[in-house]
Amino acid sequence: MFLLESNVRKFLKYTLITIIIILFVLLVVESYGKYQEYLNIKRMQNNLNYTYNNYLYKVANQRMVVEEFFDFLTDNNFFLIEFNYSLTDGLTAKVATFMEPTQKIKSKYSISEVSKINMGSNYYVVLEIKEQGVNQ
């Protein structure tokens, strides 16, 4: 009888040790899975932060380009008729102004004359202004 109890205890002892080892292995596997999930979330968060910061940079750059354009219009006394802005075509505007016959406008923008009306010593001119260097 003593021998039987000892064998049962031995079996239960080995079974318990086996169950503890299996549970430890499951704990390690689950911990590794959760750590990989954490790393994926952190990588996705870094990617979203990069995308957001890139967006903020582009918006600030666009704001600066539009501000420079309106400063150019104000400095040359242009009256805005039509204004368009897109990422692909850039800035486009139709403006009106009074110009002398020999007056020239130098700028970084492409300027083309749409119409010209003689008003005595000055001309009333409608111009189309486009941003140069934009991918079209």
Image (spheres, rainbow, N blue to C red):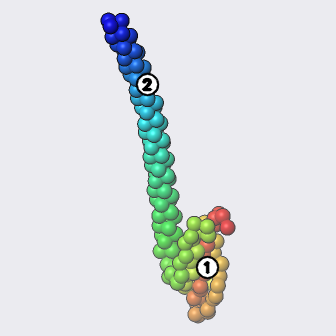
Q: Residue at x 41, y 29 (%)?
A: 27
Residue 94 shows in this picture: yes
| Residue nearer the viewer, 61 or 55 | 55
Q: Is residue 131 above or below residue 26?
A: below
**Whole-percent x, y for residue 114 in the image:** 64, 85
Q: Which mark is residue 128?
A: 1
Q: Residues under labels 2 and 1: Cα distance?
A: 77 Å
Q: Residue at x 49, y 78 (%)?
A: 77
Please identify the quadrant where the C terminus is shown.
bottom right
Q: Residue at x 48, y 41 (%)?
A: 40
Q: Quadrant of residue 105?
A: bottom right
Question: What secondary structure is marked by label 1?
Answer: strand
Check disc 2: other Cα within 10 Å, few if <14, some if 14-19, many if 20+. few
User: In the image, which is nearer the foreground, mark 2 or mark 1?
Assistant: 2
Q: Residue furthest top?
A: 2
Q: Is residue 78 above or below residue 42?
A: below
Amino acid at the residue labelled 1: Glu
Q: Residue furthest front?
A: 1
**Whole-percent x, y for residue 84 in the image:** 55, 76
Question: What secondary structure is marked by label 2?
Answer: helix
Q: Are marks 2 and 1 in contact (CB under 8 Å)?
A: no
| Residue nearer the viewer, 124 or 13 | 13
Amino acid at the residue labelled 2: Ile
The residue singled out by tag 2 in the image is: 22
Q: Quadrant of residue 16?
A: top left
Q: Residue at x 61, y 79 (%)?
A: 128
**Whole-percent x, y for residue 42 in the image:** 44, 41
